[in-house]
Image: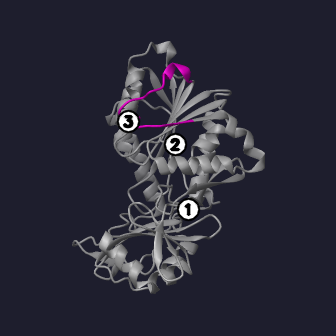
């Protein structure tokens, strides 16, 4: 794991496609300039939202390139990659400096298969132990053609685990034809409790953080911050497959996980069933609820000492409504907020400020070097 002192901040990452591909915006900047720019942008967002923060924004990085273990490319007219800067056309990418070496090797092999579809979305993924997966999001007519053609699926299944379509169905060979079976949760990602890796069960198509290396940094921060409030009762918004849930569980007395996606919760439950032997006691500290908590929170905030939230682009929305109706002394003592959409995050932080919370610590975790995107983690405490 790289530390900031080991990363060459005067370094520019070379890319043969930098004048064509729209995927990276900062290839002409040194990494040091990118760091300064992201810190400045977040500072300005806080200032413009009138959210006081008198500390230093810490920048945390696992490296300036080659981090991603999951890629999402578009396939269009035989080109596989990302859109061009100058026109609505895909840049055909044979290599990408964002990809980890194992993912680059998988992309190189995948590209030897010439997919005949006019249009598709492709996700390639490598698991913590190098397992390969591919999700092809195709039109139903193209899925049927792929099942009938057979040879391409055989090629892919000899090299990877395959999922098809929005429903993430798994093609299974029946001796003479392929049939589609229900989604299958496998350990495609991992979270961390101290130095213990915890396999997270999900689909290739599931949402996860993009990088195994960068994710460990996030897990360490979450566990550390929850640990500042020993024996706390925590409510988590957007638990997903449990990436933040597990490290938070290790530091709290009890956690209520709230999530809308059923497949994600099935993965979380499978993860809890198969925890490492040293962590099986965590199962006794969690309660899981499924529902649309952006619309309505069914829990009472007064039952919790803290909240851990990782919302979608639209932010927390109705999740915060009950908080605004509570007496100040009954509100949770702390909020931990994680987001890669700082604009909607500022809207929520402003609401939290208005009900008596202040930002005590804020960090940027740079999961997306060479781009304008970044992850923000904030710790807020009730005044």
- Name the residue at the left extreme: 87
Residue 204 appears in the figure: yes
The region drawn magenta spans: 288-304
Question: Observer-nearest residue: 154 or 323?
Answer: 154
Q: Name the residue under label 1.
A: 63
Q: Which of 128 and 32 is in front in this view?
A: 128
Q: Which numbered disc covers residue 239?
A: 2
Q: Which colour scheme is used?
A: one colour
- In this rendering, the label closer to the viewer, 1 or 2: 2
Tags 2 and 3 touching, CB below 8 Å: no
- Ranked by sequence position, the earlier of labels 1 and 2 is 1
> Callout 3: few (<14), some (14-19), or many (20+) C-alpha neighbours within 10 Å?
many
For the point 50% across and 80% down, the residue is: 156
Residue in the picture at 50% in, 68% down: 11
10 Å neighbourhood of mark 1: few (<14), some, or many (≥20)?
A: many
Residue 314 coordinates in the image, percent (x, y): 34, 42
């Amino acid at each position: 794991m790289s530390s900031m002192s080991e990363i060459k901040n005067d370094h520019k990452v070379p890319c043969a496609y930098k004048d064509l591909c729209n995927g990276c915006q900062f290839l002409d900047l040194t990494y040091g300039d990118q760091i300064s720019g992201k810190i400045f942008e977040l500072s300005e967002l806080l200032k413009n939202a009138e959210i006081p923060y008198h500390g230093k924004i810490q920048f945390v990085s696992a490296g300036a390139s080659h981090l991603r273990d999951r890629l999402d490319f578009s396939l269009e007219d035989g080109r596989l990659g990302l859109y061009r800067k100058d026109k609505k056309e895909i840049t055909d990418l044979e290599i990408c400096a964002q990809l980890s070496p194992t993912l680059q090797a998988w992309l190189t092999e995948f590209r030897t298969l010439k997919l005949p579809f006019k249009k598709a979305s492709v996700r390639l993924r490598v698991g913590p132990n190098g397992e390969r997966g591919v999700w092809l999001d195709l039109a139903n007519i193209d899925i049927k053609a792929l099942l009938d053609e057979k040879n391409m699926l055989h090629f892919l299944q000899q090299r990877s685990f395959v999922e098809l379509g929005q429903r993430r169905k798994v093609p299974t060979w029946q001796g003479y034809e392929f049939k589609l079976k229900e989604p299958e949760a496998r350990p495609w990602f991992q979270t961390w409790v101290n130095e213990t890796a915890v396999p997270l069960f999900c689909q290739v198509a599931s949402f996860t953080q993009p990088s195994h290396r960068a994710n460990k940094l996030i897990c360490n921060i979450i566990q550390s911050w929850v640990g500042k409030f020993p024996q706390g009762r925590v409510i988590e918004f957007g638990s997903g497959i449990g990436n933040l849930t597990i490290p938070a569980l290790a530091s709290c007395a009890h956690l209520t996980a709230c999530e809308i996606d059923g497949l994600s919760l099935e993965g979380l439950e499978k993860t809890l069933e198969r925890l490492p032997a040293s962590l099986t006691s965590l199962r006794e500290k969690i309660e899981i609820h499924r529902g649309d908590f952006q619309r309505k929170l069914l829990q009472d905030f007064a039952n919790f000492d803290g909240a851990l939230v990782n919302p979608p682009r639209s932010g927390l929305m109705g999740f915060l409504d009950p908080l605004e109706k509570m007496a100040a002394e009954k509100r949770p003592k702390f909020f931990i907020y994680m987001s890669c959409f700082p604009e909607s995050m500022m809207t929520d932080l402003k609401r939290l400020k208005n009900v008596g919370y202040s930002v005590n610590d804020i960090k940027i975790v740079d999961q997306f070097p060479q781009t304008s995107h970044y992850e923000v983690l904030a710790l807020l405490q009730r005044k």
